[in-house]
Amino acid sequence: MTDNAAALAHPPPMPEPPGHHLVLRVMPMPADSNANGDIFGGWIMAQVDIAGAVLPARLARGRIATVAVNQFIFKNPVSVGDLLSFYARIERIGRTSVTVNVEVYAERNPGAPEVVKVTEASLTYVAIDAQGQPRPVLPAPAPAP
């Protein structure tokens, strides 16, 4: 393997934003683009919703539902072939809800790799029971013996 091929096969690691965890990595395809060749904002929003649900689902240990998109900022366009990395951080844990911050970075230009922050969002999820009703995120502590 040539030095260039080795560098592409093993790119330098992307730095994780402080307190965030990598929860999703995906590459948008031509079917995800609009007439201008940029990736649809709605497609990115759907991916952010999927990524944002990872940590609350683990915490709630069961079903969750998106109840609010508190903030959504598109900072840079996303292109076909960008490798998107989604990082999540829990911002707040309520009785039945969890608010998450998601940051999205695009790794682009494989010949001269560049990492660009493309999106940042805040979403709130609620833990739900089998009937779709809110339930406590964290189980009640066991009674003392």
Image (cartoon, rainbow, N blue to C red):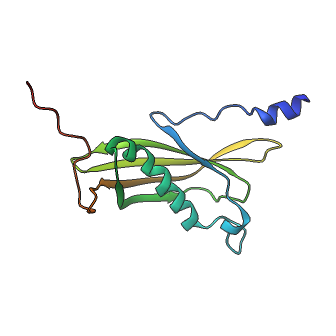
2 lies left or right of 120? right
Q: Residue at x 44, y 34 (%)?
A: 19
Instruction: Name the residue rendered at 41%, 43% in the picture.
Output: 55
Q: Residue furthest top?
A: 145
Residue 22 place in picture, x, y as percent: 53, 39
Residue positioned most to the bottom: 35
137 left or right, relative to 14:
left
In the image, residue 71 sits, relative to residue 114, either above or below, namely below
Q: On the picture, is 62 further left or further right than 47?
A: left
Question: If the image is split into quadrants, where does the C terminus sit?
Answer: top left
When asked about the image quadrant of residue 107, the answer is top right
Image location of residue 142, percent across then percent down: 15, 32
Along the horizontal axis of the image, is 140 left or right of 93? left
Q: Vertical placement of 135 versus 61: above or below?
A: below
Task: Report the residue at 42% width, 47% height from top.
Answer: 101
For image coordinates 51% across by 61% down, the residue present is 45
